[in-house]
Image (spheres, rainbow, N blue to C red):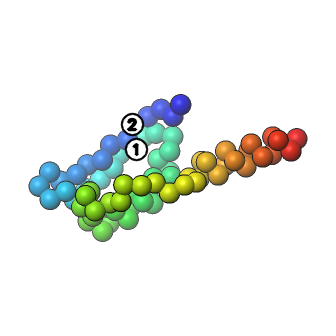
């Protein structure tokens, strides 16, 4: 089970995403998305409620499972 903390800092008046804090195992996977959201001054309500799959860790997991299967 992943461990850590993920926090989103949002302006209480206009909903602008100001920052994110991600001291957790998947922080690198979230970094580019959060960079685009923050740099564009995106309102948190405008961010789609969906995730792209497979994520990078899911791809790596699949590669490792396949390599194990072939061994």
| Residue located farthest toward the front when viewing the structure as drawn | 49
Residue 11 position (above or below residue 22): below
**N-term-proximal mark, 1 vs 2:** 2
Residue at figure coordinates x 74%, y 44% from the top left: 64
For label 1, the residue is 22
Q: In the depicted view, which residue is nearer to us: 6 or 71? A: 71
Q: How many marks?
A: 2
Residue 23 position (above or below residue 14): above
Residue 48 position (above or below residue 28): below
Q: In this image, 19 relative to 3: left or right?
A: left
Q: In the depicted view, which residue is nearer to us: 60 or 50? A: 50
Residue at figure coordinates x 74%, y 42% from the top left: 65
Quadrant in the picture for residue 48: bottom left
Q: In this image, 47 relative to 65: left or right?
A: left
For label 2, the residue is 5
Percent position (x, y) of residue 50?
42, 55
The circle on residue 38 is none
Quadrant containing the C terminus in the rendered view = top right
Q: In the depicted view, which residue is nearer to us: 26 or 55? A: 55
Residue at figure coordinates x 30%, y 68% from the top left: 40
Dot 2: element = loop
| Residue located farthest toward the right when viewing the structure as drawn | 71
| Residue located farthest toward the left when viewing the structure as drawn | 13
CB contact under 8 Å: marks 1 and 2: yes
Percent position (x, y) of residue 43?
24, 61
Q: In this image, 51 relative to 53: left or right?
A: left
Crowdedness of circle 2 by 10 Å Cα count: few (<14), some, many (20+)?
few
Percent position (x, y) of residue 54?
58, 54
Q: In this image, 30 relative to 7: left or right?
A: right
Q: CA distance from mark 1 to mark 2?
A: 6 Å
Crowdedness of circle 1 by 10 Å Cα count: few (<14), some, many (20+)?
some
Dot 1: element = loop
């Amino acid at each position: 089970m992943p461990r850590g903390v993920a926090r989103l800092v949002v302006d209480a008046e206009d909903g602008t995403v100001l920052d994110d804090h991600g001291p957790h195992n998947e922080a690198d996977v979230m970094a580019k998305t959060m960079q685009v959201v923050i740099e564009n001054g995106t309102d948190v309500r405008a961010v789609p409620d969906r995730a792209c799959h497979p994520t990078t860790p899911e791809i790596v997991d699949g590669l490792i499972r396949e390599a194990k299967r072939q061994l």
